Image (cartoon, helix red, strand yellow):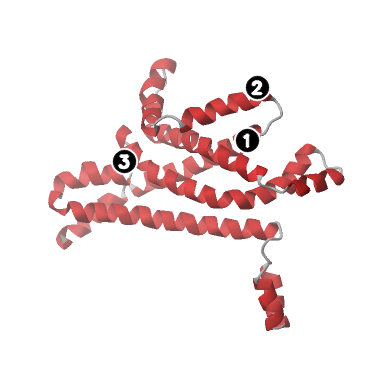
Amino acid sequence: MSDNLSRIVPVLLQGLPPTVIATVGGIVLTILLSVPAGLLLLSSRRWVRVLVRIYVEGFRGTSEVVQLFWIYFVLPVLIGFQLVPLWAGVLVLGLNHGAYGAEIVRGAVQSVPRAQYEGAIALSLSPAQRMRRVIFPQALVEMLPPMNNLFIQLLKSTAILALITVPEVTRQARDVLIPNYGDDTILIFGLVFLVYLVLAAILTALMRLAERIASRRVGRRPSRAARVAARAAGPGVSDRMAGI
């Protein structure tokens, strides 16, 4: 087993770039779709809410694998244009998780206390200014933790791209390594397990950083300068700052 490790790892890591590209591309598309879709779910116009709801329920209520087959196999028949497998996968990941993300955005915006809306109105801010300067920054703090879970789920969903020949990590393990090193199946998929675990840990660390920054911007977490000043002022002040 150990003799094959030096040959298995390089081949397996060849699938890392497509996995990372699909994950990053899917996350970017998810954000671009979920934020406007989530806000439009709160629109005062019924027809707008209905159209967005069709998108959300359509992608949440159907299989991600079937969506992938539709984009990659059926869509070219309809439009006469074949998507590159990797970008077809990114499109499906973004559309699917964007539908889930829209509900996260909607719920986060609705969780902002009503007093914040009233205060923004009292300041004579326009609806767009109220959302951009007051409501959305606070909602962002609430939506980041569930978005972290959604992005990790998206990362794991990149494995379905193996079904359309994208040479990502799982495809490399199944179609390249196993025929040559069948006796090392446990080792191979143990390494695949580790790759996803490490990528998920990195993604979680980045999202935790984003949470701290977002919390600090809306005053829910003291800045570094404030914490340094509190420590310099004494243990009593430092303890009170830690409790904020």
Image quadrant in which the C terminus is located: bottom right
Residue at image position (49%, 59%) is: 205
Gap between marks 3 and 2, in whole Å? 42 Å
Counting residues from the start of the chain, the first of labels 3 and 2 encountered is 2
Label 2 is placed on what type of residue?
A: Trp
Q: Which of 129 and 89 is in front in this view?
A: 129
Q: Quadrant of residue 33?
A: top right
Gap between marks 2 and 1, in whole Å? 15 Å
Nearest-to-viewer mark from 2 and 1: 2
Q: Are marks 1 and 3 in contact (CB under 8 Å)?
A: no
Residue at image position (66%, 64%) is: 221
Which residue lies under the disc numbered 3? 167
Q: In which quarter of the image is residue 226?
A: bottom right
Q: Which of 171 and 69 is in front in this view?
A: 69
The x and y percentages for residue 109 are 66, 43
Q: How crowded is mark 2: few (under 14 residues within 10 Å), some or many (20 or more)?
A: few
> Relative to 52, is 18 on the left or the right?
left
Which residue lies under the disc numbered 2? 47
Image quadrant in which the N terminus is located: bottom left
Which residue lies under the disc numbered 1? 36
Q: Which of 160 and 168 is in front in this view?
A: 160
Residue at image position (32%, 32%) is: 164
Label 1 is placed on what type of residue?
A: Pro
- Asked whether residue 217 appears in the rendered view, the answer is yes
Gap between marks 1 and 3, in whole Å? 32 Å
Label 3 is placed on what type of residue?
A: Pro
The x and y percentages for residue 91 are 46, 33
> Relative to 119, is 109 on the left or the right?
left
